[in-house]
Image (tube, rainbow, N blue to C red):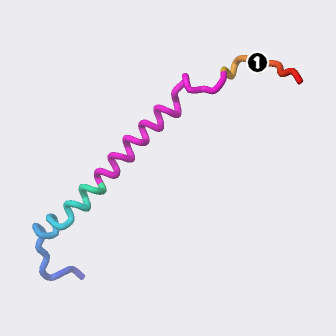
Amino acid sequence: MSANNTNLEKQTRRHRPALIGIAASVGVAAVMFFIFLTYATDPDDTPFDVNQAAPATSD
């Protein structure tokens, strides 16, 4: 069943803020994803050289 008196212009005007908010949150999530992806794959951010032997410890 559909509504009998639909005013598309009024519905468009009422839903615009919600749609803008959804689009903005998707944009922010995309930017955060690319920042995380860049940070996670940064080769200079490793805590130690994985090819180097561990230093000997003395007791």
Out of 19 and 56, give the one closest to the viewer: 56
Q: Amino acid at mark 1?
A: Ala
Left or right of 45: which side holds 59? Answer: right
Q: Secondary structure at mark 1?
A: loop
Q: Is residue 9 above or below residue 55?
A: below
Q: Horizontal and vertical percent for residue 37?
A: 47, 36
Q: Looking at the figure, which quarter contains the C terminus?
A: top right
Residue that label 1 marks: 53
Q: Horizontal and vertical percent for residue 58?
A: 87, 21
Q: Residue at x 24, y 55 (%)?
A: 20
Q: Main secondary structure of the magenta part?
A: helix
Q: Residue 46 occupies which quadrant of the picture?
A: top right
Q: Is residue 45 above or below residue 30?
A: above
Q: Is residue 21 above or below residue 5?
A: above
Q: Residues within 10 Å of mark 1 (few under 14, many from 20)?
A: few
Say how many tags the image has. Answer: 1
Is residue 26 magenta-colored? yes
Q: Looking at the figure, which quarter contains the N terminus?
A: bottom left
Q: Residue at x 66, y 23 (%)?
A: 48
Out of 35 and 2, give the one closest to the viewer: 35
User: Outermost residue toward the front?
Assistant: 59
Q: Is residue 59 above or below residue 32?
A: above
Q: Residue at x 52, y 27 (%)?
A: 42
Left or right of 25: which side holds 57? Answer: right
Left or right of 45: which side holds 23? Answer: left
Q: Which residues are magenta?
A: 23-48
Q: Horizontal and vertical percent for residue 49?
A: 66, 20
Left or right of 36: which side holds 25? Answer: left
Q: Residue 50 occupies which quadrant of the picture?
A: top right
Q: Residue at x 43, y 41 (%)?
A: 33
Q: Residue 6 occupies which quadrant of the picture?
A: bottom left
